[in-house]
């Protein structure tokens, strides 16, 4: 089986980002490094996720780049008045943790539909699924990317360098060992706000 394919930049899909968001990040010493996107559909994985501050930094980075990504969030969060509407406005999509396979299948179909219409659809996920330490990554992002045949963006949320790095982009091979090895190499230097809580870049062991 072939190894995962790295899609070299610069990439042709670009967005009009917010100067205000970039200025806000700079005010706190952060910068965003991106070289465009290779396609109009894909999955972006954000790593590591060790703090509630990750959402704030990630949201500012999203606005700074200008990409209207979607993201999954616990369905119970959308039941909170006003907050749930705000999450949807940001691009949030409710997912029931007890039945994630349904969400994966629906997203694969949504990606395929978007490709057929040439619509923009990028899904951003934290593959750890929690800011606490766990033994690996949940498989939802992997199943969506493989099922829809879309690339995966490696988004490093690096508190050590205070950088959000959107690179590289990989086309997964379907060989999980090879794919995870490539993802681990791409994200090896990313340091979370609380490093001990960063999960290893490997599939979550099955019970």
Image (tube, helix red, strand yellow):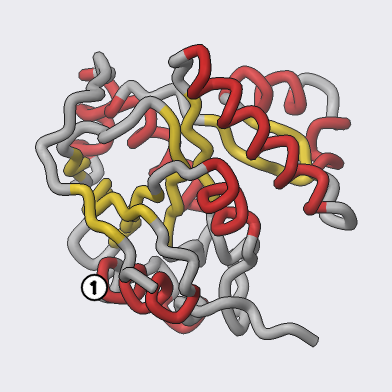
Relative depth, front residue between 72 and 121: 121
Relative depth, front residue between 144 and 123: 144
Position of residue 68 measured from the top left corner of the image (x, y, whole percent): 45, 22
In this view of the protein, can residue 165 be seen by the observer? no
In this view of the protein, can residue 170 be seen by the observer? yes
Total residue callouts:
1
Question: Which residue is pictured at 74% across the width and 83% down the height?
Answer: 206
Q: Is residue 59 left or right of residue 81?
A: left
Question: Which residue is pictured at 77% across the width and 20% down the height?
Answer: 82
Position of residue 113 measured from the top left corner of the image (x, y, whole percent): 60, 22
Q: Is residue 163 left or right of residue 4?
A: left
Q: Is residue 63 left or right of residue 68?
A: left
Task: Give the crowd class for mark 1: few <14, some 14-19, many >=20 residues within 10 Å.
Answer: few
Q: Is residue 171 left or right of residue 199?
A: left
Helix, strand or loop for disc 1: loop
Relative depth, front residue between 10 and 45: 10
Residue 85 to residue 5: above or below: above
Residue 10 to residue 119: above or below: below
Q: Quadrant of the N terminus?
A: bottom left
Residue 158 to residue 61: above or below: below
Question: Which residue is pictured at 48% across the width and 44% down the height?
Answer: 149
Position of residue 47 measured from the top left corner of the image (x, y, whole percent): 42, 61
Residue 72, by quadrant, is: top right
Q: Quadrant of the C terminus?
A: bottom right
Question: Which residue is pictured at 67% across the width and 85% down the height?
Answer: 205
Instruction: Kindly identify which residue carries mark 1.
Output: 189
Residue extending farthest to the front is 1
Position of residue 142 measured from the top left corner of the image (x, y, whole percent): 55, 58
């Amino acid at each position: 089986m072939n190894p995962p394919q790295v899609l070299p930049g610069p990439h042709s899909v670009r967005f009009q980002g917010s100067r205000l968001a970039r200025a806000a990040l700079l005010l706190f010493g952060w910068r965003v490094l991106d070289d465009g996107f290779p396609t109009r559909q894909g999955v972006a994985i954000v790593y590591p996720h060790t703090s509630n501050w990750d959402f704030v930094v990630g949201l500012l980075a999203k606005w700074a780049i200008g990409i209207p990504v979607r993201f999954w969030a616990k369905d119970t969060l959308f039941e909170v008045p006003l907050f749930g509407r705000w999450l949807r406005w940001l691009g949030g999509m409710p997912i029931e943790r007890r039945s994630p396979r349904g969400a994966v299948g629906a997203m694969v179909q949504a990606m395929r539909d978007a490709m057929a219409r040439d619509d923009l659809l990028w899904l951003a996920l934290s593959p750890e699924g929690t800011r606490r330490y766990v033994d690996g990554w949940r498989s939802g992002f992997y199943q969506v990317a493989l099922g829809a045949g879309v690339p995966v963006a490696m988004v490093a949320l690096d508190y050590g360098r205070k950088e959000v790095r959107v690179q590289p982009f990989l086309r997964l091979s379907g060989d999980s060992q090879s794919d995870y090895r490539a993802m681990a190499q791409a994200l090896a230097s990313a340091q979370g706000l609380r490093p001990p809580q960063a999960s290893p870049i490997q599939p979550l062991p099955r019970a």
